[in-house]
Image (cartoon, grey):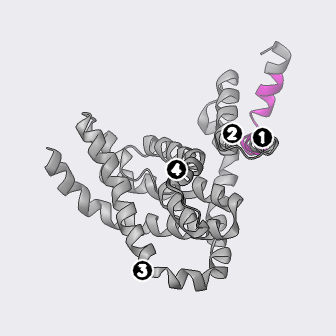
Amino acid sequence: MTPALGEIWVYLSTTPLLGLTLTLLAYQAAYRLYRRADHHPLLNPVLLAVVMLVAVLTLTGTDYQTYFDGAQFVHFLLGPATVALAIPLHAQWHRLRSMALPLLATLLFGSLTAALSAVGIAALLGASRESMMSLAPKSVTTPIAMGVAERLGGLPSLTAVLVIGTGILGAVGARYIYGLLRIEDHAVRGFAIGLASHGIGTARAFQVSEQAGAFAALAMGLNALVTALSLPWILPWLERLFA
C-alpha cells in the first residue's frame, strides 16, 4: 500500500461504518460475478465476499474488532431477516401439512446425524475435546451454534468458522448431490439444504425457488431448536462411548 493510500485508510478506519461499507461492497461485487457466471455454484457470493474481506483486512492490517464495529449492523439484521422467513413459509402451509410426518423424521435423523457424525469422525482422528464440541453444532445457524458450543465446552470462535464453512460447502455442493441422487422436488431439496447448511444454504435455496427457500427456512429454524435441546444430553454419552 502506498503512503498516500495508507493515510487515507488510517482516516477511514476510524469511521464505525467502514465495516458495513466494506461488507456491502464486497457482497455486491461478488454477486455481480455470480450473476455473470450464470449462478455457478462454485462462485457462491458469500464465499467470494468472505475471501475479498479477508484479503482487504489482511493487506491493510485491520483487526477484526475494528471491522466488526461497523459490520455489526449487518449482524443485527440477521434477527429480523430470520423472522421474515415465516412469510414465504406461510404460503407453503398446505404442502407443509401434507409432508409433516416425513419432515419430522428427516429433521430428527438429519439433525442428530449432522452432529454425531462430525463428533465421531473427529474422535476417531484423535481430535481434542474442545475441537469435538466446537464441531458438534456446525450445521446450526451461527448465533445458536456459538452458544451451544460454549455450553458444551467448545470454542465459539472456532465454531463460527466451521459453521460458515459448512454453509458454503452445502451451498456449493448441494446442486451436484441432488443431481447425482436425482432429487427434483424443490421442497425436499430446500429442507435438506436448510437442515445441513443453515442460513447460507437457505439463501441459496431461495435463489432456486420460493418453495425451496421456504422449506429450507423451516429446516434451519427447527434444526437449531432440536440441536440446542438434544446435544447437551447426547454428547456426554457419546464421549463415554469413544473414551
Q: Tell which circle, 3 or 4, labels the residue nearer the N-terminal end.
A: 3
Query: Residue placed at 57% from the left, 47% from the top?
Result: 176
- Residue at image mark 1: 37
Magenta span: 7-26
In the rendered image, the quadrant that contains the C terminus is: top left
Which type of secondary structure does the marked residue at label 4 adopt? helix
Query: Residue placed at 43% from the left, 46% from the top?
Result: 156
- The kind of residue tagged 2 is Leu
Single out the residue that lies furthest toward the top.
2
- Measured in 3D between alpha carbons, the distance from the residue under mark 3 to the one under mark 1, in whole angstroms, is 39 Å
Which type of secondary structure does the marked residue at label 1 adopt? loop
> In the depicted view, which residue is nearer to us: 144 or 194?
194
- Residue at image mark 2: 43
> In the depicted view, which residue is nearer to us: 43 or 57?
43
Q: Tell which circle, 1 or 2, labels the residue nearer the N-terminal end.
A: 1
Whole-percent x and y of residue 96?
Answer: 55, 80
In the rendered image, the quadrant that contains the N terminus is: top right
- Measured in 3D between alpha carbons, the distance from the residue under mark 3 to the one under mark 2, in whole angstroms, is 36 Å
- The kind of residue tagged 4 is Leu
> Horizontally, is 176 left or right of 62 in the view?
left
- Residue at image mark 4: 180
- Residue at image mark 3: 101
